[in-house]
Image: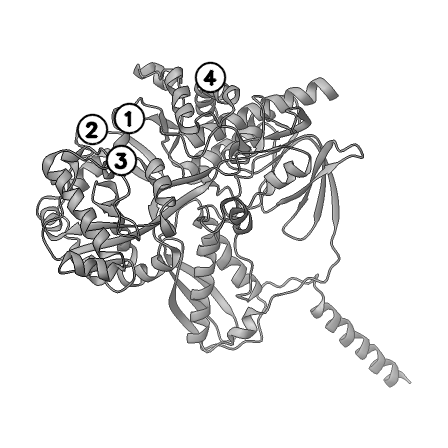
Amino acid sequence: MKRDLFVSFLCLVIIFAIILVQSPLMPSIGAKSDVKYKAGTYRAKGIGRDGEVIVEVTFTSDRIKEVKIIEHHDLLGIADIAIEEIPKKIVEEQSIGVDVVSGATFTSNAILRAVEDCVRQAGGDVDALLKRKTDDTPPKVEVLEYDIVVVGAGAAGTAAALAASEEDVSVLLLEKTAAPMGASVFAGGLFAADSSLQKAAGKVVDKEWLFDRYMEASYGYMNSILVRTIIEESGRTVDWLIENGCKLNLVDAGTGGSFAHVGMPATLHGYAEGGKVAINKLIESFKNNGGQVMFSTPATELIKDSEGNVKGVVAKKEDGTTLEIYAKAVILATGGFGGNEEMMRQVFGDKFTLGEITQNVGDGIRMAWDAGADEYGTDVAHYFWQTFTHDEIETLAGILGYDYFALTDFTFYPHLRVNTLGQRFSDETMASNFAIHGAQLHMQPHQTEYLILDTSVLKQIAEKGYVSVEEHYGQWKGNRQFFMEFNMPTDTDELIKRENTPIDYTPMLEAVLGTGVVFKGETLEELAKNMDVDVNNFIESVKQYNEAAETGVDNMFFAEADRLIPIKEGPYYAVKYVARNLGTLGGVRINEKIEAVDKDGHPIPGLYVAGADAGGMYGKSYVDFEGGTLGFAYTSGRLAGENAAKYVKEKYK
């Protein structure tokens, strides 16, 4: 009897132990997988957004012990979160079937592919590690209440949250990514007319001049009252940002590479520490005011009452918990829809380029439309400069490493450009006016251009540097201009040095022949055939361009012909570029108070839309002076926060 009781007790202990081991409530620290490895450290690479991502993985015999990112060249402010989060998740979950980081898809996938390669090297079962871990626990619902909810932690959303938090209201800031990584994080700076920095430097900008630039860019397709309000408030925004910890430097126009802007008024207040540092400092100021922030928490829809009034948002936490957040006012600032292929195709047809910020998929725009807001400005895309396709970057980086980026050096100078028909299509001396040339390039077949180089200019640069072709930065010698763009220094001292340094580009061009990016011909006819463009068109384009350079008169596009660079000595090279889209710049009609309005122009009570979700600042393309987009984002966000707080206090308190 005693023996039977003992056996029964032992069985219960064993069963209980099994239950404990299998329980999802038990800690998994040090958990081992069923996959076996050859213990050791292995290295592999994937191709991220801007080049190679080199990863090192250490295995024990039965688990992934450590994942290290040894080297990468992807944009700081976008890649950082993937660099930090993906290795941690792989080790924690003992899986490579982990979620990519929203907004850093290329970097995330590069890490995952490199780790997959290391798993193979270590003899592991890749298929087993690709299986997703499932969570069978039922979804939870949590109810929260705030005075104001802001959706999106870029420049517009952060400014809105901070401005609202300065009033006697409770504010929640939601961000779908694990940290701020919108366009504002890698932008260079914002415009203003009459900031304290401009006043101190004696460089106040005429507000009529700014207004005229908007009018020229839009041809009337703008909300002139909104534009006038943003210009008027722009200086106050700069000073307010500085007061809240954002360090800014006023810099001369053209110092960031846009030679076409040299001599224009100094509108750009450049990030002194980079966009990532600036946004994080503003968020800290917001939190110091009592504001609450939730990252990795995308908002999915607005909460409306039976009469259709906006009463809050529904969001989802990373653990799957649904949040019902009730609020008296909602501010949407989700960055446009440049990362949404379906919406881009609907608006622009098959001729489009996805925006640089992939997590911006129109969340806020869709929510505002659902609440009855009118559509405005969806057809405005921020085409700016030129680039290579991601597949081309992968190929080039595989051959040259990050040195491939030097192939963009040519784009800053007035070399001949032709389209896929072999036709010259623009004033090459305006190619560094990136917004205008970006739009011109977007309108070409396949959004493609070929930049033509001859051997004589390549020899000249190899012997004397690019300064011998055209000097862009020498005027700032002894008058250093400095700011951070893409979270990297833009420093005229360094740019002067680089422009005066002889560089032999020929070996690099030769190394990537046959990639579909660089082409060569001993004769112009051979080059045209290798480019697969119409030979007659191409020869005629070269002839017309050379005649303009020789005579000093461009009868085709009225360029400053003395700046054109003759094509005269073979062998010849062509570098192919495609249009680059920073994102979209509109979607929801707003008024000068940054309130969303319906088709009759009436405000939707308690709903505000700021930054790239809002329409009305532009016509068809980006405005032609420096800092326009970021300036609108910060100022519209600040005004949205101030006006939302005023609305809440007047109506509810």
Residue 345 vs 440, above or below: the answer is: below
Q: Dot 3 corresponds to which residue?
A: 430
Q: Position of residue 599 (x, y in %)?
A: 65, 29
Q: Is residue 358 above or below residue 473?
A: below
- Determine the image quadrant of residue 33: bottom right
What's the CA distance linking mark 4 and mark 3?
30 Å
The mark nearer the N terminus, 4 or 1, is 4
Residue shown at the point (76%, 76%) measured from the top left: 14
**Pick the front one: 364 or 290:** 364
Q: Earlier in the sequence, mark 3 or mark 1?
A: 1
Q: Are marks 3 and 2 in contact (CB under 8 Å)?
A: no
Local crowd size for mark 3, using a 10 Å CA cut-off: few (<14), some (14–19), many (≥20):
many
Q: Quadrant of residue 288?
A: top right
> Callout 3: helix, strand or loop?
helix
Q: CA distance from mark 1 to mark 2?
A: 9 Å
Image point (73%, 38%), residue name? 303
**Side of 466 where 74 appears, left or right:** right
User: What residue did someone put label 1 on?
Assistant: 252
Gap in angstroms between the C-alphas marked 2 and 4: 30 Å
Q: Amino acid at mark 4?
A: Glu
Callout 1–callout 2 Cβ contact below 8 Å: yes
Residue 136, labelled with which disc? none
The residue that label 2 is drawn on is 476
Q: Secondary structure at mark 1?
A: loop
The CA distance from mark 3 to mark 2 is 21 Å
Q: Which quarter of the rendered picture does the N terminus lie within?
A: bottom right
Name the secondary structure under disc 2.
helix
Camera-near label (4 vs 3) is 3
